Amino acid sequence: MKRSVLTRYRAMAYITAVMLLVLCACMVFKYGFGIGKDLTLVVAQVHGVLYIIYLIFAFDLGSKARWPFGKLLWVLISGTIPTAAFFVERKVVSEVAPLLAKATPEPVKV
């Protein structure tokens, strides 16, 4: 497995988690104070697209790390629970980092 697989996952986990928190704040303003209806729609659509990208990258990482289905499902769902992706990302990195250390690339012969 390449380090770039983990890097892509980490980036999308943080982006998706932040966008979900922004979406939650927009929902509070929309339903609590009656303002920001259009902004909430835009943020929801952006989060939806970013979540789909997150799903692709998380599935790619999970298939290369050979996770069981339950673990893969938990990682995929964590993008829908506010702040969960932050904690799940840390746990995933701590579990996948040793796999990356074992897969040292061979030197290129010139």
Image: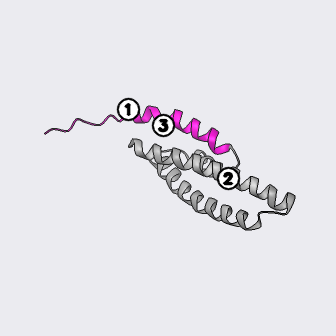
Residue 5 drawn above or below residue 108: below
Disc 2 marks a residue whose amino acid type is: Leu
What kind of element bears circle 2?
A: helix
Report the disc number at residue 64: none
Q: Which residue is mark 2?
A: 20
Q: CA distance from mark 3 to mark 2?
A: 25 Å
Disc 3 marks a residue whose amino acid type is: Val
Report the disc number at residue 102: 1
Identity of the residue drawn at 60% across and 52% down: 16
Q: Are marks 3 and 2 in contact (CB under 8 Å)?
A: no
Q: Earlier in the sequence, mark 3 or mark 1?
A: 3
Q: Is residue 75 magenta?
A: no
Q: Is residue 98 left or right of residue 16?
A: left
What kind of element bears circle 1?
A: helix
Residue 108 visible to the viewer: yes
What kind of element bears circle 3?
A: helix
Q: CA distance from mark 3 to mark 1?
A: 10 Å
Residue sitting farthest toward the left: 110
Q: Earlier in the sequence, mark 1 or mark 2?
A: 2
